């Protein structure tokens, strides 16, 4: 992430595979066929409904520097949500803040418009959608068709059961390629196991040049006070660009334009209090203001971030999807054999005098239970033992009557 780099937000989404089989699609070894449903047109621009989701998600992250692509995360969750039913689907919609059907239209409009900017006015945007499904599995055709129609996703049959490490290599190779090498990996063998059945991914890479670049000769060391109150020295860029500017009682924000007017880099500085976005004005409000020339000092920075989203998404209301027997992903397979096993996010961003470059990847996977058909809830007094298996010797033995004592 050095000179000549630009901003983030390019997405990657779930893919689809379809083998016609009386209303279902089977991802068998013979004949992987792409769904014959065409991609929906981008239609008119659809205003985003994701601002609340984005704010809540950011505030749920650990303290310190955080880099997220809410759009990338929303794409993967919406893709998975297309395969959810009953209360599980309702939870996906609660977290995202809109019905899945509404998000399909919104995200389809967004990603096609982003891709259309590639190659224009020093702007480079790549977009990749991917879905990996277990070979030999049975997948519901409406699920696959929805992903093809709204996300333009293609599907790859993968043998998670016999070769999970090979699947890890395949998914990470896609990740590296889709982010132009900025994010080499997104999954590992702790996420992809022999029980994995489906993985959805969304990748983003955007690189753009400022409409008015900062002069490198003006960059100088300057103090910056961190969230803990400590003072550090940063490389501060200085300039007098034309920006959109908005000041409220709680937030001062600017939108620094890239050469392509469809992209802007927003900076929001809260008036006081902790650095939380929930409860503050929508950062995008500044985009409705007129441009004005200001004297701007902005730090150069390079930030990287990686995080499992399970805890944050559970806090936001996605609860049942993680538990076998409670999750209802029957829209994918026709039964309730799958549950959400991971949602992982990585993102990077570099800002300098010339522009900004960023990338983000989100991957979400669903697995089958490692003990299908068997459930044991130990909710009463029990015995325990540590045994030497070859000799059947009880090396240690006990009885647990009250685990709280």
Image: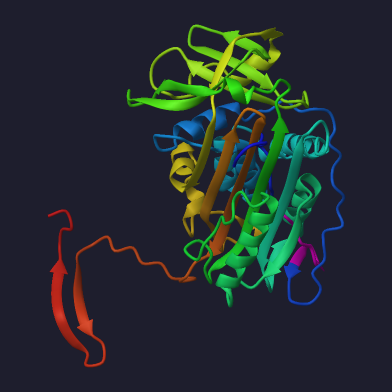
**Residue drawn at point x = 69 percent, y = 39 percent:** 206
Can residue 247 be seen at all in this image of the molecule?
A: yes
Side of 274 where 142 appears, left or right? right
Answer with the quarter of the image where residue 29 lies: bottom right
The outermost residue toward the front is 217
Judging depth in this view, the residue of 67 and 105 nearest the camera is 67
Query: Magenta includes 18?
Result: yes
Say whether residue 343 is left or right of residue 179: left
State the image quarter where residue 228 is shown: top left
Q: What's the coloring here?
A: rainbow
The residue positioned 73% from the left and 22% from the top of the image is 211
Image x and y of residue 61, in percent: 44, 37
Q: Quadrant of the C terminus?
A: bottom left
Q: Where is residue 5 in the image (x, y as percent from the top left)?
A: 66, 37
**333 w.r.t. 231: above or below:** below
Q: What is the span of residues highlighted in magenta in the rendered image?
A: 15-25
Among all residues in the image, which is located at the extreme bottom?
391
């Amino acid at each position: 992430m050095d000179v000549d780099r630009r901003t983030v937000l390019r997405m990657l989404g779930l893919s689809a595979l379809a083998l016609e089989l009386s209303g279902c699609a089977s991802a068998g070894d013979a004949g992987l066929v792409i769904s014959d449903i065409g991609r929906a047109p981008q239609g008119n621009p659809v205003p985003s409904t994701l601002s609340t989701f984005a704010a809540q998600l950011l505030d749920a992250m650990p303290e310190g520097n955080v880099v997220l692509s809410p759009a990338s995360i929303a794409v993967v969750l919406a893709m998975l949500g297309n395969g959810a039913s009953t209360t599980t689907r309702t939870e996906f919609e609660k977290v995202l803040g809109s019905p899945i059907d509404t998000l399909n239209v919104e995200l389809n409009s967004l990603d096609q418009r982003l891709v259309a900017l590639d190659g224009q006015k020093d702007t480079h945007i790549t977009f990749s959608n991917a879905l990996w499904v277990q070979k030999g599995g049975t997948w519901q055709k409406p699920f696959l068709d929805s992903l093809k129609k709204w996300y333009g996703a293609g599907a790859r049959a993968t043998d998670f059961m016999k070769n999970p490490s090979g699947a890890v290599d395949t998914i990470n190779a896609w990740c590296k390629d889709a982010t132009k090498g900025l994010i080499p990996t997104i999954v590992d063998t702790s996420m992809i196991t022999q029980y994995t059945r489906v993985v959805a991914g969304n990748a983003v890479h955007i690189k753009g040049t400022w409409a008015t670049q900062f002069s490198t000769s003006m960059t100088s060391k300057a103090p910056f006070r961190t969230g803990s109150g400590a003072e550090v020295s940063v490389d501060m860029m200085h300039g007098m660009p034309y920006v959109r500017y908005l000041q409220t009682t709680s937030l001062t924000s600017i939108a620094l334009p890239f050469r392509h007017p469809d992209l802007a880099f927003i900076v929001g500085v809260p008036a006081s209090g902790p650095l939380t976005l929930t409860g503050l004005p929508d950062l995008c409000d500044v985009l409705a203001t007129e441009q004005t020339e200001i004297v701007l000092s902005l730090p150069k920075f390079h930030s990287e971030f990686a995080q499992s989203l399970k805890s944050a998404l559970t806090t936001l209301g996605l609860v049942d999807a993680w538990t076998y027997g409670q999750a209802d992903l029957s829209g994918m397979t026709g039964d309730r054999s799958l549950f959400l096993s991971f949602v992982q996010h990585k993102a990077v961003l570099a800002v300098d005098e010339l522009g900004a470059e960023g990338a983000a990847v989100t991957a979400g996977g669903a697995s089958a239970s490692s003990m299908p058909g068997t459930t044991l809830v130990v909710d009463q007094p029990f015995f325990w033992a540590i045994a030497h298996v070859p000799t059947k010797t009880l090396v240690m033995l006990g009885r647990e009557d009250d685990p709280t004592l």
